[in-house]
Image (cartoon, rainbow, N blue to C red):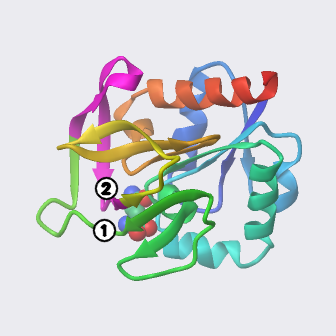
Amino acid sequence: MAFGVLALQGDFAAHAAALRALGVGVRDVRRCRDLDGLSGLVLPGGESTTLLKLMADEPWFDALARFHGEGGALFGTCAGAILLAREVRGPAQPSLGLLDAVVERNAYGRQVESFETTLDAPALGGSIGGVFIRAPRLRALGPAVEVLARHDGEPVLVREGSVLAATFHPEIAGEARVHRLFVESARAAVVA
Ligand code: GLN
């Protein structure tokens, strides 16, 4: 099984390192055709507006919808989660609509723009580490979306089928369990 990391902008190298540490094959994805043969793709954190501009060079929206439709697993962190959402606020911008969620960008306000914390994640065996950097907040979730971790009661790690999204950065916190979950869910999809 091979995994890819969208390597247009943001902290894609940290995700590639996190996946390699789990012993899986990883390659950078810079063109739509690089998706061929991948079981899963990480959409990294960075700046979602910049990512959208860079994605205008190729038919990424169609290619990622097809990848998802053919069973490819997707994992978005922070800006990547914003790209996956059904609706983006603060301000509104285009998104892939592969996760039934309403996301508000930069939603923690200026005083607490960035922070590191421990998250309540019973689905992952207890508490996990997370770094929030100008993070979004999940303002509404569709009925098929499972909450896997919370911060102060609010959802911060969610899953809808083969789509996993975190508003924080596990790859910066040295937190391997979220990437492991992603790899395992992609494997399960292959077996199913
Ligand atoms: N604030 C960024 C955005 O709106 C996301 C920040 C991040 O990915 N750490 O796209």
Horizontally, residue 61 falls left or right of residue 127, namely: right
Q: Which residues, given as a range, are shown in magenta?
A: 117-139
Judge whether residue 47 is colored magenta: no
* Residue 31 can be seen, yes or no: no
- Label the magenta part by its dominant secondary structure: strand
| Residue 89, picture quadrant | bottom left
Q: Residue at x 68, y 72 (%)?
A: 55
Tell me if mark 1 has few (under 14), some (14-19) or many (20+) residues whose alpha carbon lies within 10 angstroms of its own.
some
For the residue labelled by badge 2, is the local secondary structure a helix, a strand or a loop?
Answer: strand
The three-letter code of the residue at mark 2 reads: Ile
The three-letter code of the residue at mark 1 reads: Asn
Horizontally, residue 154 falls left or right of residue 190, namely: left
Q: Nearer the viewer, residue 86 or 47?
A: 86
Q: Are marks 1 and 2 in contact (CB under 8 Å)?
A: no
The residue singled out by tag 2 in the image is 133
In the drawing, what numbered circle is on residue 122?
none
Q: Residue at x 34, y 46 (%)?
A: 156
User: For ligand 1, which image quadrant applies?
Assistant: bottom left
Task: Judge: label 2 CB < 8 Å from ligand 1.
Answer: yes
Q: Is residue 18 above or below residue 68?
A: above
Query: The N terminus is located in which quarter?
Result: top right
Q: Nearer the viewer, residue 48 or 157?
A: 157
Judge whether residue 120 is colored magenta: yes
Foreground label between 1 and 2: 1
Task: Judge: label 1 CB < 8 Å from ligand 1.
Answer: yes
The residue singled out by tag 1 in the image is 106
Q: Is residue 135 above or below residue 56?
A: above
Horizontally, residue 108 falls left or right of residue 81, namely: left
